[in-house]
Image (cartoon, helix red, strand yellow):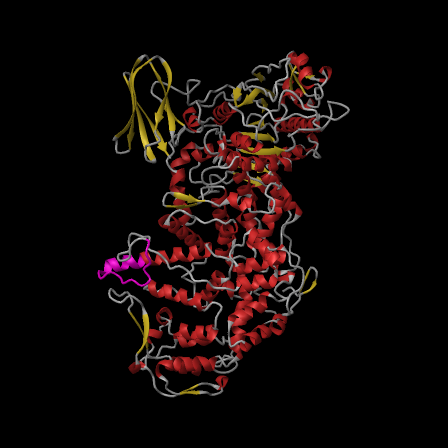
Amino acid sequence: MPDQNQNGPINYSMAPYTGAWTKAEAGHLLRRTLFGPTNQQILTAVSDGMATTVSNLLQVPAMAPPLTFHPDEGVTAFGNTWINDVYPSNATDATATLGARNISLAAWLMKGINEEQFDISQKMILFWQNHFAAIAVSDARATYDYVELLRQHSLGNFRQFVKDMTINPMMLLFLNGATNTLYSPNENYARELLELYTVGKGPQIGPGDYTNYTEDDVAAGAKILTGYLVDGLGSDTITTVTSNYTAILHDTSTKTLSYHFGNATIPNNGANEYSDYIDIIFQQNAVAEHISRKLYRYFVNYDLTTDVETNVIPIMAATMIANNYEILPVLTELFSSEHFYDVSVRGALIKSPLEMIFSMFNSTESIPGFDLLTDSEMYLVLYQFATVMGQAYMEPPSVSGWPAYYQTPAFSQLWVNSAVLKTRFQVSDFMTLLTGVPGNGNNWKFNTLTFLDNLSLPADAPTVIDDIADVFTPKGLSSTQKLLLKAVLTNGLPDFEWTLQYNEYLANPGDPTYSDPVVQRVELVLQQLFHMPEFQTI
Amino acid sequence: MKRRDFVRNLALVSAGTPVLLNKMNVQSIGKKLFTVAKNNEDRVLVIIRMNGGNDGLNTVIPRDQYANLTIQRNNVLIPETDVLELTTEVGLHPKMTGMKTMFDSGSLGIIQNVGYPEQNRSHFRSMDIWTSGLIDSPADTGWLGRHFDNEYPGYPNGYPNGTHPDPFAISLGYEVSATCQGLMANFSHAVNDPFDVYNLSSGGAINDGTYYGDHMEYLTTLINQANAYGQQVNDAANAGTGSLASLYDLTNPLAQQLRYVAQMIDGGLQTNVYILNVNGFDTHNAQVSTTSTVEGDHATLLERISDAVASFQADIEQMNHQERVAGMTFSEFGRQIASNASLGTDHGDAAPMFLFGSCLNTNIMGNNPTVTDTIVNQAGIPLEYDFRDIYASILKDWFGVPTSEIQSFFEHTVQYYPILGACNVGIEEEDSTAIGLTVDKAIVYPNPASTNAKIRFVAENEWVKVDVFDIQHRKVLAVYDGNLSQGEHNIPMEIHELPAGEYIVQIKKESGLVHSKLVKL
């Protein structure tokens, strides 16, 4: 693995970055924290400076709830939200309604990414979905509540997040907490709580001993967590799915943890015992290190080299601990660090399917903008595109999340192979050369004119290409590539002919005779760009 | 091109590739069926785009207009004595010696004054019109793309395959050609260098040892693997050993590209269309040098095209491929009759096209433009031939496409000219009449159509009733009911209120019933 970049040794310092702050650095920050920054957003970040930009990005606004659009919905009226509505009594109708609500949820997830504002929330929700990696369950209301939990805690207190997740109805269903009782303990959640969600599984250093916890801890944890049931699932009378502590199902014995947790004993504490247990888990610094590594891999680089383990992860973890497991200060420090802007980590990740899709849409300011039904059908197409490419949002392939985020040594290269790459090209060709995303008899194409108008100097062909490279690629394009793209833009003519054409379009607003050729040339440029390897990285 | 493949290929639409993408294939379904096989499926058409708007008056020079040319464009005019004489009336730019030799041996044709009504002088819009072959409709598909769509519905799903291992069209360079844009995909495959087909990303990515460089190498490898046609193209180029390098000046970029084409043809590539591009014809200033109107930018461009085409033709002939290779040039417009003060010319209207090959029916088609003695501001050359009719004639003569299909590719009533049919002896002609119409036939055009379409048929001084039926055979539109004289008729049909779908147009004549399918978009 590389230990230096073209310009010299890699800078691992977590000290505040004070170097140049240009479109390159601002674009890097925005591409990592947003799905698809626009040229104007990058320019705003340049003028605001790093500190203000990082501060602006680290916010998590509320999201409007998903709405009913599908005729199979049996209870909630079109255009209203179903998140607190019962299901039909009839089993057939209830199944159909669940289907309608699930696709409403899928469309809503895509809409959320597509309509992201200047904040990190959508990237964080996906980060936590990969971390907890739960698969949608048999009640869409529980699935929605789970996603909402991911959003609420995105930048908040991780300890409280784990506590809430532990008794979240969808998680109780997903990892069998709802059937973990005094009479029939189920270790599924107790195991993942340690192995994946908090301290992480280290090397096996003894029989049943994984560095940070033991098999006995898993068994003790399962007992601690007994007694929670899920109520209201698929109910035709209860409007929300809840978890409820049932004392008679709880194991009231005193549980003893291993030396990794200081041989702590946990006496019966009923409904709050799980919270006591999690407080003890969080006394291990390994929790902070584990989450820091995951944040680093998601936002910076997949490669946890010795240098990163020595210089970066401990600083992140120390910040997390010093701030009582708040995530916000850790990310503030990370996105403000010298290491984050080191040229060696720029372009060090391959775009995930969702990043690839929404970098096209969001960076061109393209939203469907039809009506609820049409927009939703189009968003479902995008959900399917991402699924075909290997990233179904509510169906991660395993409890560990998507392999591209953890599987050594290929990591993000796992997102693409020659077949998937062809699909990526087909999808981008669909948007640039062909009809765009279909839905309810309409087609959603890029907002190409707005995209073009909002570039720095749209009448100037070389600047158009420079801006496009700045927006879509992490390290720019070669001069040969730019000349090629410029030749596509100008159709091989001298640059001034593009200027004339663009100005004619400006002088004849709304006249497709002038705007169509402009749109076509820009879309052909994007088509070429989307086939370049540079576009596939972030 | 194998027309009988249609049904089989249609079945392939739903196989392979993601279901989701297949859902979007609906537009490409619903074309009519023709099952007559032709023997001209190995025909090759080479298209050279003269990008920027070629000055036709300094290319094919009307020798009988010299007095008035002097009035109109003296500062760029070629001295009369330097013009290469083709006929008493027509000459070529003095740098075009290669093409003059071709003309003398019958392998160069000229079509005078090609353009379209109400010429648009924007490069971008006019090039869209030329590549799409559509004037009133959005330029969403190319004229050859529509032809390929008709032949190979569902492309690219299921391609390449055992029957069609090679790209249908190759665009030399990095950019696919709008000419070949189909409904679902572009039929042209961009090839910059057939001997280095994997250099797709034009010199960007290198592995410099960084994480990023590692990804670049990885992605480039994958892109190469995804390049389904790369190996075929490369193999063909290497097998094309019959081509003689000595015939070409390989410092001339167009000559180098045409040599690649010759090598791919000789190597057995089944590609039917090659598209090449020459930039620089937008000669607003310094079209000619300050010291001589025979020299300058335009002269260099014409010399390169002339030399390269002559070399290519000689190579094709010595390899004995001349009966299956033909070529044409086009430019988005000609330039104005009067020159400007910058030793240049501004955007104009019609201009000559060149055809080349050994199967030409004609050497010069059309008349010299008439140049008046009065300078009219911004005047261009008026149109004599509609470029769409030239395209249609090429499709008919060269690729043997039935005229009923050709008509459906265009918005206007197509007029055919015999231009490339000299090698068609022995090839089955589907249409016995020049226009492809017999009493038992009717043609709907354009088809598919969105607002207005026409039905074209012949009548024999008889009562005729034309109606449109839906697929349940319910009458949805009465088009015509009355007497018609003997001959061809083009009856407009107001179909804008019909729902999208397939319809049958019925023509009830005393001589019998004729049906034709209509697809409403």
Q: Is residue A153 left or right of residue B222?
A: left
The answer to whether residue B182 is above or below residue B217 is above
Q: Nearer the viewer, residue B426 or A40?
A: A40
Give the total number of marks visible in the rendering.
0
Magenta stretch in the rendered image: A79-99
Residue occupying the far right of the picture: B291
Residue for point 22% across, 62% down: A89
Residue for point 64% across, 59% down: A21
Query: Do we see residue A479 in this rendering?
Result: yes
Is A85 a magenta residue?
yes
The answer to whether residue A188 is above or below residue A252 is above
x, y percentage for residue B170? 56, 37
x, y percentage for residue B474? 25, 31
The answer to whether residue B431 is above or below residue A516 is above
For the C terminus of chain B, the image quarter is: top left
x, y percentage for residue A368? 43, 48
x, y percentage for residue A69? 33, 52
The answer to whether residue B169 is above or below residue B421 is below
Report which quarter residue B507 is drawn in.
top left
Query: Do we see residue B168 in this rendering?
Result: no
Q: Is residue B193 left or right of residue A362?
A: right
Residue for point 49% across, 23% down: B389
Residue occupying the far left of the picture: A90
Q: Nearer the viewer, residue A54 or B196?
A: A54
Q: Is residue A173 left or right of residue A477?
A: left
Is B106 a magenta residue?
no
